[in-house]
Image (tube, grey):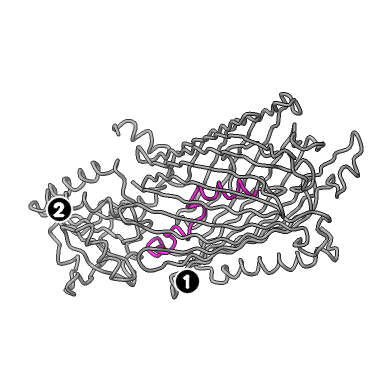
Amino acid sequence: MKRRSFLAASLLVLPTASRAALPGTPAPALSLPDASGRTVALDALRGKVVYVDFWASWCSPCKRSFPWMNEMAQRHGPQGFEILAVNLDRKRDDADRFLKSTPAGFTVVFDPAGVTPAAWQVKGMPSSYLVDATGKVVMAESGFRDDRKAEVEERIRAALAAR
Amino acid sequence: MPDAGFVQIKYLDYRDWQPGARRMRVENPGFYVMSPFADAWVVEGALVYDGMSGASPTWHDTLSGASGEGIHDRRAAGDAKLTRYFERFSVGAGIAYSHENDYISRGASLDLRVWTADKNRTFAFTYAGAADRINTPDGAASHERKYVNDFLFGVTQVLSQTAIVQSNVTYTRARGYLDDPYKTFDARPDRRRVLAWLTRLNQHHPASDGTLQLAYRYIDDSWDANSHMVEAAWVQPLPYAFSVRPNVRYYTQRAAYFYFDPPFPSGLVPGQPYTADTRLSAFGAVTLGVMLARDFGDGWSGDLKVEYYRQKSSWRAGGDGSPDLLPFSARWIQVGVGKSF
Amino acid sequence: MTASPAMRPARLALALALCALLGGCASFAPPQPWEKEYLARPSMQFDADRLDTRNVQHIYYSKEGAAGGYGVGGGGCGCN
């Protein structure tokens, strides 16, 4: 989709919730166990550019977002880019089944009680946030859309360049 | 907005009968496709075909064709719809066309959906209009026209993690040729106003993993054939990716004010509306059905449904069903295959 | 709509149906976006199977006095 038509389309779009409070503020705390039970904390990743993604097995756009996230992790990982995918499934079995058919080449942590999404003001599934090297949220996205991929990758590059 | 496309083929075999006589047989293949594209658009289309044959009443429950001749008719219909999605609302436009040897229908529709930021409440507004032409081979209806306008207002509300309810009010205004040209004598008003109020609830029960589906609809009709409908179904997932859905429906209606009981044509007054069509009599009807479905993986799904329907005057709620009519029964079997992509 | 003796059982059925439906309203707790796991199921949606709804409503429309409520604009038929 060309730049101009995208701008025209976005003018027709009512203000989105994803442009609300979070960007520009320090990222909320995040400390959750990964598949092996080891605790992963966002604070410990200070100095890297982190893409925090909230997902669940029952969310169909999430299935499409994983291959793209794998691509981003491979392409920008060496430059200091990390992905932290927070799973919100109630039952671990459902998440495991999803990961078996849609593998993740990045860190997956689990929050079955849904404690973190409220703090991050998650408005839709999936929701993703780009946290820069200083720990500040610079971008919040609700949903996964093909026409946003290029722009999001631009923001990742910009955050990596600013390290 | 749907995230994935879906294509589906179904085949329906329908038969109805009354004591001592078979009536109609309909074979109905159908096709449906839905696809999102360009990130904010969805296109949908359907094509259905009806092959109808058999006997139909000329009045009350007296069937046509002593010699066994009956009706052979074919109907082909198609419709398409385009919807544009925005952050908090969507706009859709659709067209519909239906053709059989004596009846052509052309229609268009517009709809607007608006939802809250948390997507827990959606409002729907739809308008549909149709212009029909009726022209029977025997000349009973010669280039007659019929116009129908439908207005729908609906609210869908998510009640909790496990319950969602929807309530729709539909106002339908029909004018023009509303008679049934295949009945020996049938003269209906040239206007009809129908108000239908449907409320349905889906409730999931995590303990059993099953879902209860309930619906109630009240219809207020300017021809007086007011009705109530209640329906209940249970969707139960089973092992090996199967699920089963039994359902039951009860329907009860009053007679139209110009419906007259047998014998035909008592009550007939030239210049006054008259019908001996049992569809406008007072009756109750019950449907019992079951559907079996399976998820075959990779987006493939299949389903098989059987339903049995019986309409009887004595089943009208409260009694007072139209007298001296035979019960009417029908059964249909529907098989379908679908693929999401 | 005055209640004749014939209408009373119908009114009772209506009252019971509404109570059953409203029973679902007893717990009004609209969920957060990440709590919509069950709502994503086809059995929790309305008109998940368009062709099925169309077929079934077409049958009832042609065998009963009146119809409506399920959505409009699907196309007409010669079912006068």
Q: Which residue is mark 2?
A: A73
**Tag 1 and tag 2, C-beta contact below 8 Å:** no
User: Is residue A128 placed above or below C78 in the rendered structure?
Assistant: below
Which residue is located at x 44 percent, y 61 percent? C39
Residue B174 coordinates in the image, percent (x, y):
72, 37
Residue A121 coordinates in the image, percent (x, y):
35, 60
Q: Amino acid at mark 2?
A: Ala
Which residue is located at x 71 percent, y 67 percent? C13
Q: Which residue is mark 1?
A: B205
Co-location on one chain, circles 1 and 2: no
Residue A120 coordinates in the image, percent (x, y):
32, 62
SS type, badge 2: helix
Q: Amino acid at mark 1?
A: His
* Residue at the limit of the structure toward the left, as seen here: A78
* Residue at the limit of the structure toward the front, as seen here: B67
- For disc 1, the chain is B
- Residue B193's image quarter? top right
Region in magenta:
C33-60
Side of B92 relative to C13 (left or right): left
Spatial CA distance of label 1 from label 2 is 39 Å
Q: Assess whether residue B338 is covered by the magenta stretch.
A: no
Q: Assess whether residue C40 is covered by the magenta stretch.
A: yes
**Helix, strand or loop: magenta stretch:** helix
Which residue is located at x 83 percent, y 46 percent? B259
- For disc 2, the chain is A
The numbered dot on residue A154 is none
Side of B45 relative to A107 (left or right): right
SS type, badge 1: strand
